[in-house]
Amino acid sequence: MFAQETTAELWAEQQVRCVLVPYGQHVEVQLRNADGSAFLRKTAPTRQAALNEAEYLRLLLDAAHRPATKRGLRPFALVIEDDRDNRDAFREALRLSGMRTLGCSQGSEGLALARELEPDLIVIDYRLPDLSGAEVCRQLRSEPDVASTPIIAITASPEALRAEGCAADAVLSKPCQLETLIAAARLFVRDLTADANAQWA
């Protein structure tokens, strides 16, 4: 139960600290100033939802420093996920937000497709049949043509993924609401349709 947990700091960036605070049956995500005072509080129903909220807030702080996406064709996302239902749901959410999408179920196939197609965004699961999501991320970061491609990892084991040294730009926790994925994708790919969230209302 959350009441037995203690406050946990998740990240600190640009003089801002993000902490999780048990709050009754829920978890509160707080952004705190350098002096420790909270200037933003959001309540989440579960720890997974709180982790996703905290990750989204971190991405918002970093959004101004990201370069604009390539112009021309609609942005393209590659989804590497071995669970077909999740893969289809992620692809459909990204498609409705204005992206072209392609999905695959294996890390090695995802690496080959990323090298060949140079997507604007990669969404990847941690546990894949052949390579771990962290290993795929490491290999992508060593490839000059795709090293700077934004990567969103979605996993039921965010701590294990980070412990393995995953170089993803964002780590979202499963179960992940599709609205959360769309919001995160929009931070990396700026020219997505503004009304995408309405599709999931």
Image (cartoon, rainbow, N blue to C red):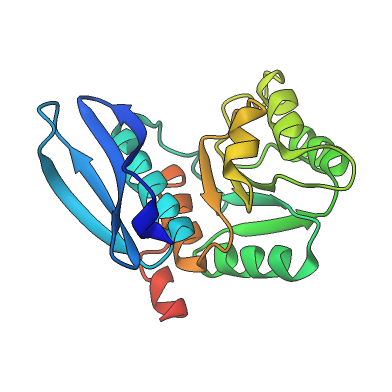
Residue at horizontal 29 percent and vertical 27 percent from the top: 13
Q: Position of residue 44 (x, y in %)?
A: 34, 63
Judge from the rendering whether residue 191 lies leftward or rightward of residue 105; answer left or right: left
Q: Nearer the viewer, residue 23 or 120?
A: 23
Q: Is residue 131 left or right of residue 33?
A: right
Quick check: 103 left or right of 193?
right
Percent across and percent down for residue 136 are: 75, 33
Q: Nearer the viewer, residue 92 or 30?
A: 30
Looking at this rendering, what residue extends furthest in the front direction?
A: 4
- Farthest residue in the right direction? 130
* Residue for point 11% across, 45% down: 39
Question: Total label count?
Answer: 0
- Residue 181 or 10: which is nearer the viewer? 10
Q: Is residue 81 above or below residue 109?
A: below
Q: Is residue 27 above or below residue 107?
A: below
Residue 86 placement, left or right of 198: right
Residue drawn at 52 percent across, 67 percent down:
178
In the rendered view, tell whether residue 14 sits above or below residue 41: above
Note whether residue 191 is visible. Answer: no
On screen, 177 above or below 127? below
Front one among 2 and 122? 2
- Image quarter of the N terminus: bottom left
* Quadrant housing the C terminus: bottom left
Residue 191 screen position, x and y as percent? 42, 52
Residue displayed at 57% across by 26% down: 148
The reply to whether residue 183 is visible in this rendering is yes
